[in-house]
Image (cartoon, rainbow, N blue to C red):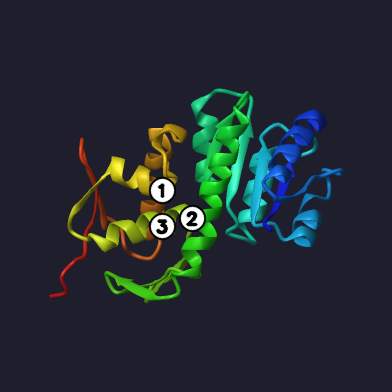
Amino acid sequence: MFNILIIEDDVTLYQQISDRLEQWSYAVHGIHDFQHVMEVFTEVKPELVIIDIQLPKYDGFHWCRIIREHSSVPILFLSSRDHPTDMVMSMNLGADDFIQKPFHFDVLVAKIQALLRRAYDYNAEAAELKTFNGATVDLEQNRLTNDHGTIELTKNEIYILKLLIEQKNKVVSRESLIERLWEDERFVSDNTLTVNVNRLRKRLGEIGLENTIETKVGQGYKAIEKVSP
């Protein structure tokens, strides 16, 4: 049974989501005092977190940032706001997906199931290490290490990198990445993939691996394995 923490102050919506998820045998936990979100997070140890943007005290972006300082748990944002910058902001802070209110509960469940499969089924069979341009890629711990240091990646970032280096020096289409990442492209914005790849590029640059993922306009992305002199 997966533990899911819902950080949502709309009591009616929380109960609706909770009832639906419990039908799928998820253990659902909520927040009663929004000054103690991280205490509940630490106690519950959730396998997935759902966060609303507009919350009492601090907004959802704040809590996403704090959670990412301690954990790579999948994070799904909810928002009644429809401005594209909200989605971009959430992804840049380390969220894994974004859904706009009002939403269909079947779509929410599908997104949750996809995130859990990627995060836990994948990790269960990904204990091996890979290398990429001299860096060790630890697929189980979601990190890359080389002489410049170590970076921690989100579940989406490490999976995108895995898919690209499996076909290094070859173009992987956007459609193929979306299908592998989200299982059903009807449930994902094309811009979500762009944000995730851009964020991955930025993280790689932190350990000297800038320019190792190329965008092929109209085609997709290519992981460049540089040949040592």
Q: Secondary structure at mark 3?
A: helix
**Rendered location of residue 65, percent (x, y):** 62, 49
Viewer-nearest residue: 129 or 195: 129
Name the mark nearer the viewer: 3 or 1. Answer: 1
**Residue kind at label 2, given as amino acid type:** Arg
Which quadrant would the C terminus be assigned to in this image?
A: bottom left
Which residue is pictured at 69% across the width and 57% down the height?
46
Q: Secondary structure at mark 2?
A: helix
Name the mark nearer the viewer: 2 or 3. Answer: 2
Viewer-nearest residue: 173 or 185: 185
Does the rendering let one see residue 217?
yes
Q: Which mark is residue 118?
A: 2
**Rendered location of residue 223, percent (x, y):** 25, 57
**Rendered location of residue 213, percent (x, y):** 27, 54
Q: Quadrant of residue 136?
A: bottom left
Proximity of marks 2 and 3: CB atoms separated by less than 8 Å: yes
Proximity of marks 1 and 2: CB atoms separated by less than 8 Å: yes
Q: Which mark is residue 159?
A: 3
Viewer-nearest residue: 191 or 56: 191
